[in-house]
Image (spheres, grey):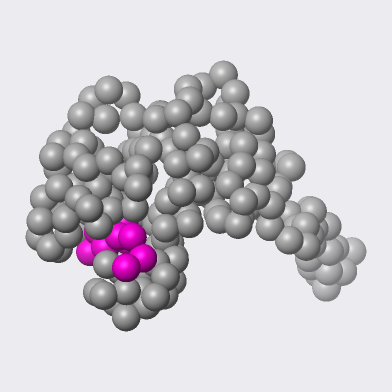
């Protein structure tokens, strides 16, 4: 066989082997959290959610969105994780997934009116995502130290957001209790 023919066969076989992965479904799926954290199914993926495991995970969310009219990508990653688990019928218990928000990301927990005052954006795009996460059993927390530093009061929070003493304490406590840390 000539080198050109061998190279052509190798290229063609590579395309055939990667074909199923590249031929993803037309749209994203939202098996647990509608409208947020869309996923694509990859049936032959090597590592998948394991229904035998107890998923206890803490997401450290510190980065702000690129602009205040955008959903925070680190917060949406939490929804993506829940949807990935849900696609394989894995449903963590309420409170087993925690998002701790602090640093520049802190204002994402504001209700619409205080968010609008601060950003000039009428609707906080993160409120609907926070509500959807909470409905899925995710516990959304905010650092009180970051609230103080950002001039945010407890009456300005999206309902259901838990105020912790500090993100540092929350991260340490949950990891010592066996939660896996996913940074942003």
Residue extending furthest top? 52
Span highlighted in magenta in the image: 104-113
Residue 62 in sight here: no
Which percent across, then down, holds residue 134?
Answer: 45, 41
Residue 15 in sight here: yes
Left or right: 51, with 73 as reference point: right
Q: Residue at x 23, y 38 (%)?
A: 171
Q: Residue at x 78, y 62 (%)?
A: 26
Q: Is residue 118 above or below residue 89?
A: below
Left or right: 112, with 43 as reference point: left
Q: Residue at x 73, y 61 (%)?
A: 27
Question: In which quadrant is the N terminus drawn?
Answer: bottom right
Question: In which quadrant is the C terminus drawn?
Answer: bottom left
Q: Quadrant of residue 181?
A: top left
Q: How many marks?
A: 0
Foreground residue, 73 or 3?
73
Which percent across, then down, holds residue 170?
Answer: 21, 36
Foreground residue, 42 or 115?
115
Left or right: 95, with 155 as reference point: right
- Asked if residue 69 is among those painted magenta in the image, a careful observer would answer no
Q: Is residue 5 above or below residue 89?
A: below
Q: Is residue 90 above or below residue 60?
A: above
Give the main secondary structure, helix, strand or loop, of the magenta stretch.
helix
Residue extending furthest bottom? 120
Which percent across, then down, holds residue 97?
Answer: 41, 35
Q: Residue at x 56, y 55 (%)?
A: 36
Q: Is residue 64 above or below residue 100?
A: below
Which percent across, then down, holds residue 150?
Answer: 14, 63
Left or right: 182, with 151 as reference point: right
């Amino acid at each position: 066989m000539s080198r050109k023919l061998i190279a052509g066969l190798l290229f063609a076989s590579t395309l055939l082997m990667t074909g199923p992965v590249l031929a993803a479904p037309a749209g994203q799926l939202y098996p647990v959290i509608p409208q947020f954290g869309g996923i694509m199914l990859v049936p032959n993926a090597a590592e998948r959610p394991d229904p035998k495991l107890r998923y206890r995970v803490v997401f450290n969310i510190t980065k702000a969105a690129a602009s205040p009219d955008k959903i925070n990508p680190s917060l949406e990653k939490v929804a993506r994780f829940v949807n990935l688990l849900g696609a394989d019928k894995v449903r963590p218990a309420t409170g087993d997934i925690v998002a701790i928000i602090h640093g520049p990301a802190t204002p994402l927990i504001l209700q619409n009116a205080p968010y609008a005052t601060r950003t000039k954006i009428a609707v906080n795009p993160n409120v609907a995502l926070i509500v959807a996460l909470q409905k899925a059993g995710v516990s959304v927390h905010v650092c009180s130290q970051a609230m103080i530093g950002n001039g945010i009061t407890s009456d300005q929070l999206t309902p259901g957001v838990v105020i912790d003493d500090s993100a540092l304490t929350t991260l340490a406590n949950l990891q010592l209790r066996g939660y896996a840390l996913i940074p942003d």
